[in-house]
Image: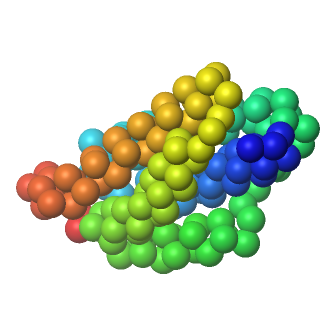
């Protein structure tokens, strides 16, 4: 990959994380279950770390990281997550499940590319975080702990 290609790919990942942070906030704001809210807050922090970790590589490869604001796709993701999240925990998690599937796909593809070793290490760590996020959301939707905790569904 050329420096230009690497910068473009990394900028896309950073933008995805920017959008994910805002989508997570919509879900967090609408979930009553403390345990789920806490885990989603941790995942949101992972996305912030991804931005921080990947942005210097964008610069290294000759471009500027994206501004910390959603792009058009991000506005759509945030809006859909907000709408679904207002319908309760299950819908908030289903919205985040959809978002994390997209993020997982993008990071999985990125982790399979020919990066310098230091960049690959960071991209793989981010991909591992994304896989962990999706596994938690999938498991939580299956076990539905909010139904037994008394929090609103």
Tally of marks: 0
Q: Outermost residue, left direction?
A: 148
Q: What's the residue at 64%, 22% (across, down)?
A: 118
Q: What's the residue at 28%, 47% (across, down)?
A: 136
Q: Nearer the viewer, residue 102 or 61?
A: 61
Which percent across, then down, holds residue 32? Answer: 32, 55
Work out which quarter of the rendered image holds the N terminus and state it: top right
Residue 27 visible (yes or no): no
Q: Nearer the viewer, residue 93 or 150?
A: 93
Please identify the quarter of the rendering in which residue 147 is found: bottom left
Q: What's the residue at 53%, 52% (across, down)?
A: 109
Please identify the quarter of the rendering in which residue 49 is found: top right
Q: Outermost residue, top direction?
A: 118
Q: Nearer the viewer, residue 118 or 42?
A: 118
Residue 82 visible (yes or no): yes
> What colour scheme was applied to this rendering of the protein?
rainbow
| Location of residue 92 with respect to 19 vertically, above or below | below
Q: Is residue 125 left or right of residue 2?
A: left
Q: Is residue 152 left or right of residue 105?
A: left
Which percent across, then down, holds residue 114? Answer: 63, 39
Which percent across, then down, holds residue 65? Answer: 81, 43
Q: Nearer the viewer, residue 134 or 92?
A: 134
Q: Is residue 58 left or right of residue 48?
A: right
Work out which quarter of the rendered image holds the C terminus and state it: bottom left
Please identify the quarter of the rendering in which residue 23 is found: bottom right
Which percent across, then down, holds residue 126? Answer: 51, 37
Q: What's the residue at 45%, 53% (across, down)?
A: 104
């Amino acid at each position: 990959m050329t420096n230009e290609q690497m910068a473009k790919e990394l900028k896309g990942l950073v933008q995805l994380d920017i959008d994910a942070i805002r989508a997570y906030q919509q879900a967090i704001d609408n979930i009553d279950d403390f345990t789920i809210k806490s885990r989603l807050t941790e995942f949101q922090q992972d996305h912030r770390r991804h931005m921080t970790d990947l942005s210097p590589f964008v610069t290294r490869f000759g471009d500027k990281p994206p501004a910390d604001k959603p792009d058009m796709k991000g506005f759509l993701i945030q809006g859909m997550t907000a709408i679904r999240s207002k319908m309760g925990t299950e819908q908030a998690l289903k919205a985040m499940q959809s978002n994390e599937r997209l993020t997982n796909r993008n990071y999985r593809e990125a982790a399979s590319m020919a990066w310098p070793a230091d960049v690959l290490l960071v991209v793989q760590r981010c991909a591992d975080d994304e896989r962990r996020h999706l596994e938690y959301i999938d498991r939580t939707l299956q076990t539905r702990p909010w139904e037994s905790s008394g929090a609103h569904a």
